[in-house]
Amino acid sequence: MTRPVLAVADLRFRYSRRGEEMYHGLDHSFVPGTVTALTGPSGRGKSTLLYVLGLLLTPMSGAVSLAGRAVSSAPDAERSALRARRFGFVFQDAELDPTRTILDAVCEAGLYGGGRPGELRSAATTLLTRFGLDHRAAHRPGQISGGQAQRVALCRALLNDPDVVLADEPTGNLDRDNANLVLGALADVAAEGRTVIVATHDEHVVDRCDEMLAL
C-alpha cells in the first residue's frame, strides 16, 4: 500500500503576535519509507514543528498537507479525527498512565479512534509481541525499564495503523543500548512505508536516520 506524502509549504509559525517567527517559509516533503531527523540548536522549533505537522498547532501561514490535501486549516473536528487515525505520537517520557497495565496503555489510542475494545486488545497484543513486550502486558509502567516504556509508547502510536509517526526526542532519557532498540523499531516502522519523523539533538540518532532536516 502506498502511503501518502506529508509536506509543508511556505510554513511560518509563532506562538504570539509579537513572538519570534519560526521556519520563515519552510518548504519540505517527508518521504514515506524513511526516518527523517529534525535537527538544530535548542529553541529552533524542532518539537513545535512536530506539533504543527501533527495538527496540534496551527501555522501562522502556509500549510501542512497530507496526500496533496491541505489539512492544517481543516475544522477542529476533522483535525482531531486525522490525529486519531492518521498520526501516531511518541514523546520523550513515554507518557504512560502509571495506574493502567501496559496492554491497556497501548489500547488507549484505539479508543480515541473509535475502535472496539476486543479488537483493540487483540491488535495491541500483536504489537507487544512484535516488539518483544508481550510478557509485560499485565505489568504497569513503574515495573518496566525506560527502553521498554518507549517501545510500549511506539506500540500505542501504531495501534491505529497511522501513515505518519512523530517522535519527540524518543531516546533522550535512554542509554545507548535501549536507544538503539527504539531506533531500530522506528526504522522497522518506516520500512513498512510509513513516514517517520524524529526531533532530536543527538548526533547518534541523526546518524541512524535516513534523511535530515536542519532548522
Image (tube, rainbow, N blue to C red):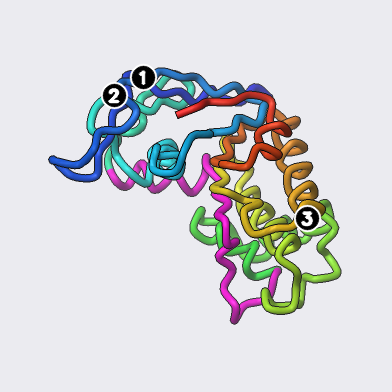
Q: Quadrant of the C terminus?
A: top left
Q: Quadrant of residue 73?
A: top left
Q: In the rendered structure, are the residues bearing label 2 and label 1 in contact, judged by CB atoms less than 8 Å apart?
A: yes
Sooner in the amino-acid sequence: mark 2 or mark 3: 2
Task: State left or right for residue 138 relative to residue 73.
Answer: right
The quadrant where residue 97 appears = bottom right
Check disc 3: other Cα within 10 Å, few if <14, some if 14-19, many if 20+.
some
Numbered label tally: 3
Residue shown at the point (65%, 48%) measured from the top left:
158
- Tell me, yes or no, whether the highlighted magenta stretch contains residue 96: yes
- Residue type, label 3: Asn
* Image side of residue 19 versus residue 23, left or right: left
Element at badge 3?
helix
**From which residue to which does the magenta span run?**
76-102
| x then y, percent, for residue 86 | 52, 40
Q: Which mark is residue 9?
A: 1
Real-space Cα separation, disc 2 to disc 3, in angstroms: 38 Å
First in sequence: mark 2 vs mark 1: 1
Which label belongs to residue 62? 2
Name the residue at 50% across, 19% down. 29
Q: Amino acid at mark 1?
A: Ala
Q: Which residue is mark 3?
A: 178
C-alpha span from label 2 to label 1: 6 Å
Compared to residue 127, the image places residue 107 above or below, namely: below
